[in-house]
Image (cartoon, rainbow, N blue to C red):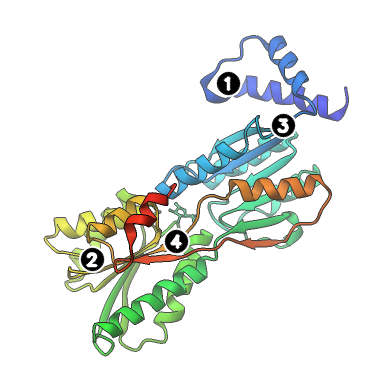
Amino acid sequence: MNSKKIGWALLAVVLLLTGCKGGEELTEPSLYEEDVATREGEYIVVGFSQVGSESDWRIGSTESFRSTFTAENGYYLIYEDAQQKQENQLKAVRNFILQEVDYIIVDPIVETGWDAVFQEAKDAGIPVILADRSVEVEDEDLYICWVGSSFEQEGIKAGEWLKEYLKKQGRDQEEIRIVTLQGTLGSTAQIGRTEGFWKVLSLQENWVMLAQQSGDFTQAKGQEVMEELLKSYEEIDVVVCENDNMAYGAIEAIKKAGKTCGPEGEIIILSFDAGRAALETMLDGDINAVFECNPQLGPLVSEIIMRLERGETVEKIQYVEEAYFDSTMDLESVIQERTY
Ligand code: GYE
């Protein structure tokens, strides 16, 4: 057996032991081995460790990877959902190494804690590609490259938008009380958006950050945190929601508390991601502005893999382009074209 064959045999064993993907029981190991043997050489085997399914953005991301890494496109995808727990991601990556996949793709839940497992992948000669969120590692050579959004830019854009909006409303001297519903603490999206917004906030003498609290990027936690904040602070002028789903939770909480939000309401709502549902919520008048974050990274990662397969070099960092939308724009046409 060559090493690839050993890999496939191992993969079959691991899949058998772990009960296989997609709920299918593999009761006929010989059949399965035969099946993978015919696949040998035909497919590029990719292990993808996804964050979870916490948000609409995430659903769009999963869909993008699943529809890109198909047999039709020459891939065999092993998809693992980490349910927002880094320990699950570490386990998934170790399983990918054991299965001798050709590439490991990780969307890291948080930035730290990756050195050891990425070293193991490197020692096994398996390239690691990061998508969406990034990592803090001692040695940057532990991963090939990263593709995703400039979260800090998104945060800056939100701050700049708010500054202009308040100026137009003649509120640039008034005290502006802000709260932030942060994403998963320690994730690149949270860190970048928080820091970016602070870059603008720290230059505004009249802005006060009353509180920042994590809603873990989910609607339920976003609502819970917002309910508490509304109890603690009588007057809130702005809620910065570090993703759309937390914004939906915040809006629920605001309405339950008998308050109003959006361009015609008392509280300004800013959000990140700009999925179709957020644009529709803006059309309904509950959100002031959304800052786009594109989840469709699958094709970009596939392009990177194709380049690596051809022996070409790839850029270490690749940012995707992003826009923003507010209630003064023609949202109907944007919504029509929105695929996530
Ligand atoms: O904004 C949020 C998701 O990492 C950019 O994760 C991603 C973020 C996204 O849960 O909705």
Q: Nearer the viewer, mark 2 or mark 1?
A: 2
SS at mark 1?
loop
Q: Is mark 1 within 8 Å of ligand 1?
A: no
Pick whichever of labels 3 and 1 is earlier in the sequence.
1
Crowdedness of circle 2 by 10 Å Cα count: few (<14), some, many (20+)?
A: many
* Residue hosting label 3: 99
Where in the figure is residue 147, as x and y percent of width and height? 62, 57
* Residue hosting label 4: 292
* Residue hosting label 2: 262
Query: For this view, does 196 lie left or right of residue 326?
Result: right
Q: Name the kind of residue labelled 2 in the image.
A: Gly
Q: Name the kind of residue labelled 1 in the image.
A: Gly
Crowdedness of circle 3 by 10 Å Cα count: few (<14), some, many (20+)?
A: many
Residue at the spot 49% in from the left edge and 61% down from the top edge: 189
- Looking at the rendering, which quadrant does residue 149 occupy? bottom right
> Distance between the Cα atoms at labels 3 and 4?
36 Å
> Distance between the Cα atoms at labels 2 and 3?
50 Å
